[in-house]
Amino acid sequence: MKISKRAQNITPSATMRISALAKEMNRRGERVISLSMGEPDFPTPENIKNAAAEAIKNNKTKYTVNSGIPELREAVAAKFKNDNALDYSSDEIIVSNGAKHSLYNALLSIIDEGDEVLIPAPYWVSYPHMVNLAQGKPVIIDSREENGFKISAEDLESKITDRTAAIIFCNPSNPTGAAYSKSEIERLTEIFIEKNIIVIADEIYEKLVFNGFEFISVASLNEKIKSQTIVVNGVSKAYSMTGWRIGYAAGPKEVISAMGRIQSHSTSNASSISQYAALEALRGPQNEVENMRAEFEKRRDYFQKEINGVEGINCNLPQGAFYLFPNVSSYFSEEIKGSTEFAAYLLEKGKVATVPGAAFGMEGFVRLSYAASMEELEEAAKRIKSALADLRKS
Ligand SMILES: Cc1ncc(COP(=O)(O)O)c(C=O)c1O
C-alpha cells in the first residue's frame, strides 16, 4: 500500500524501540534491567483507581463534552490557581488524551507551513516530529553540559529569525532533568515578549523537583507572557497515571477553542472514566505525590553518585524529572562510534537498557531513567561498572 511522505518521515520513538527490545530479551530469559522508559514505576494511588471503578459503576461511560467534563476543567483551573498563581476560566482549559495530545493540538492550532518552532536540545523525542506533522520547521537550540543543559538568552537569540513563531519550552526537562530558576525564566521571557514568540510550556514534570527547588510556570511571570503562552500539563507523571491518558492545556480562549475544534474532529473527548480518575487525582489527597517525589529524590541521590563515580563518566545532578543524562563520550572508539553503539553495548554486555543521547538530539550522552526500584538501580550500577571496566580493558 502507498505510504504518505508524511508517515515515511516519522521514525518510531527510540525510547519505545529500546524498551520493546529489552522486553524481548527478557522474554528470552536474559533478565534485562530497563532504565529506558519515561514512566514512574509506582502503581496509580488507590483513591484514584477507586474513583475510576465508581465512574464505571455509575455509568459514566458515555461521550463527554469534547473539551472535558466541567468538574475536571474546574479542578484544573483550581490547580493552576493554587500551584502556579495562574487564573484561567474553564473555557481557557482543554482536557486531552495525554499531555502529548495537548502538545500536538497546540502545534496544529498555531503553526502554518514553514513557521519555525524553536526546540532547545536535548529535547523530548516527539517534539521535532510533531512540528513536522504540523508542517512547521523545527529549529534546534543546542544547550551545553557546563550550563546544566539550559539555554541562555544568547543561545535563544542566535536562532530567532523573522519566521520564528513559537518555542517548545520543557521545564523540568526530559531527558536532562534540568530545571530553570525564576531569574533564568525571566531573562528568556523578556525575549519571548520582545520577539512575540508563542511559548508552548511543557510542565509535565512540574511536581518532580528536588532539594526544595521552587518551580515557576513561565506563564505566571506577567499578563503579557500569559497571553502568548499555552501551558501543557497532566496527571501522567505526578500521579503515576501514564496509561490513563489524561493531559490538559491552558491558554487564551481563542487558541483553546481552536484546539477544541481539532480535537472534536480527531479524537473527541478523553476517556470518560479516566477523566473521573483525574478529577480524584487533582481534588483528592496529595500525599502520594509527595511520597513518590521523595522516593525519586532518594534514588536520584544514590544513582547520580554511582554513575558519576564511574571512571570516564561525568554526570550532572539534575534538579527535576527522573532521568540522569551522563556524558559517556570518553568511551567512544572505532567500535563504539557514538551513543547509539554505547547503548547497544550496555544492553548486550551489561543487560541494562538505556536511551542514546542521539535520540534526543545530543551526541555523547545517554539517558538513564531512575524510575526503577532501589534494588534494580543497585544491580544496574554494578552491571554498568563491570561492562565499562571490560570495555576499558579491550
Ligand atoms: C516532556 C514530556 N512531555 C509530555 C509527555 C507525555 O505525557 P502524556 O503521557 O501525558 O502524554 C512526556 C512523556 O514521556 C514527556 O516526557
Image (cartoon, rainbow, N blue to C red):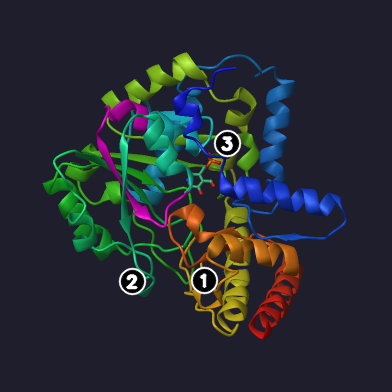
**Residue at mark 2 to residue at mark 3: CA–CA distance:** 36 Å
Residue occupying image coordinates x 33% and y 59%: 142
User: Who is closer to the viewer here, 121 or 62?
Assistant: 121
- Tag 1 residue: 326
Q: Residue 278, which numbered label?
A: 3
Give the percent coordinates (x, y) of residue 288.
63, 54
Given residues 260 and 75, the one toward you in this image is 260
Q: What is the spatial separation of the Cα atoms under label 1 and label 3, in whole angstroms?
A: 34 Å
| Residue 101 placement, left or right of 284 | left
Q: Earlier in the sequence, mark 1 or mark 2?
A: 2
Residue 86 location in percent, x, y? 32, 44
What residue type is disc 2 on? Answer: Asn
> What residue is drawn where x is 62% and y is 50%?
39
Dot 2: element: helix
For residue 147, which numbered disc appears in the image? 2
Q: Is residue 59 visible?
A: yes
Q: Can you say whether 241 is above or below 95 in the image?
A: below
Q: Which residues are magenta?
A: 107-124
